[in-house]
Image (spheres, rainbow, N blue to C red):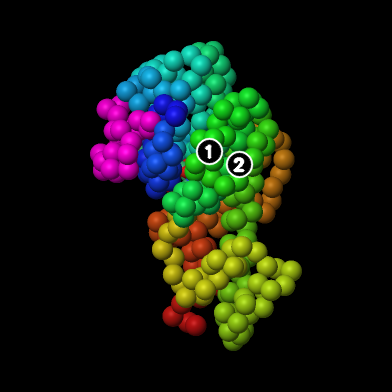
Amino acid sequence: MTKLGFIGLGIMGGPMSAHLAAAGHAVRGYDVHADALAKLAAAGGTAATGIADAVADADVVITMLPNHPQVEEVVLGPEGVLASARPGTLLIDMSTIRPETSIEIARAAGDKGIRVLDAPVSGGQAGAEQASLSIMVGGEEEDVATARPLLEAVGSTIVHVGPHGAGQVVKAANQLVVGGIYGLVAEAIVLMEASGVDAKTGLDVLAGGLAANRILDLKRESMVAREFRPGFRIDLHHKDMGIALAAARQADVSLPLTGLVAQLVAAGRSMGYGALDHSALLKVTEQLSGRSEAQE
Ligand code: NAD
């Protein structure tokens, strides 16, 4: 049994912390939303009164927060994890943030004798609920070994991909590929519909050939039916495209397709689709051609 502090009990952190409690760990969780705390208590964890209360006695701290400003506040803030946790504690940040911030946090934590891993996830809300997340881990080998039994309670694929920040780089690569595929599936739908071809039938053929991919498998029906309930929101994908471009700048490389996809995702947000699933890139693509569902 591990004494665990868990901060950020939202769409992902809620079910993840519940799985860890169900696996027999003593989970002390904190979130700024009271209903998230109540859910953790109902799932067998303990609601903490603040960050310090969640982490002071912990062996391992997990953070699952929206973006780098929240991670910086929770980890580096005056009453944050580094100020409150004991030396020797392992901090696993599972949020999707800039690799740069993960590296800065590892450096600041090292000064306090606190070990750190960046361990962002792929698999979405369903993956969190089913404990089947893919987890890409950056950091030291021995810390990954310590974390592995805990990560196995929330994920089915756990891969150590390199040093601090490498987990975030792999996650950025994942998000740029996912965004690009959504953009291209959207273009395929618009082309077929504008040409008077049944898009559902066309995509069924694509899904059996070289163009086959998981997004076609999971999303082609809902996209053709214009069902855009999230899922993974455009707003979060916008954040992740920004992370991919920032990582590209940091690595001194040019990623032209990523830049283009980032602009399409940004357009989706500007058009008011931020709260829709990222498959709503289809709405952006349609509007670029002056088309809307009404014209089908
Ligand atoms: P969310 O907004 O549902 O959850 C984040 C939680 O953090 C919220 O409950 C919020 O109240 C809490 N929080 C924010 N600031 C806080 C603070 N200062 N102190 C304590 N709690 C605080 O977001 P989510 O969907 O769970 O995503 C979390 C991370 O996982 C993000 O980085 C996201 O990109 C990543 N992610 C999400 C998905 C997905 O499908 N939702 C998939 C993969 C990765």
* Residue in the picture at 38% in, 32% down: 27
* Quadrant placement of the N terminus: top left
**Span colored in magenta:** 26-50
Dots 2, 1 in contact, CB < 8 A: yes
* Residue in the picture at 61% in, 62% down: 214
When the figure is inspected, residue 176 is found, relative to residue 18, above or below; the finding is below
When the figure is inspected, residue 158 is found, relative to residue 228, above or below; the finding is above
In-front residue for pair 58/136: 58
Residue under label 1: 151
Decide if residue 136 is on the left or right side of residue 25. Answer: right
In the rendered structure, which disc, 2 or 1, sits on the residue that comes first in sequence?
1
Decide if residue 104 is on the left or right side of residue 47. Answer: right
Quarter of the displayed picture in which ligand 1 can be seen: top left
Residue 8: in magenta span: no
* Residue in the picture at 41% in, 36% down: 24
Q: Residue 247: horizontal and vertical position, in percent?
A: 63, 38
| Disc 1 crowd, CA 10 A, few/some/many (<14, 14-19, 20+) | many
In-front residue for pair 113/233: 113
Q: Residue 273: horizontal and vertical position, in percent?
A: 42, 60
Decide if residue 118 is on the left or right side of residue 63. Answer: right
Q: Secondary structure at mark 2?
A: strand
Real-space Cα separation, disc 2 to disc 1, in angstroms: 7 Å
Three-letter code for the amino acid on which mark 2 is drawn: Ile
Q: Residue 86: horizontal and vertical position, in percent?
A: 44, 15
In-front residue for pair 208/272: 208
When the figure is inspected, residue 198 is found, relative to residue 73, above or below; the finding is below
- Name the mark on residue 158: 2
Q: Tell me if I can see residue 263 in this picture.
A: yes
* Residue in the picture at 35% in, 30% down: 28
Three-letter code for the amino acid on which mark 1 is drawn: Leu
Query: Residue extending furthest bottom?
Result: 196
Q: Quadrant of residue 242?
A: top right
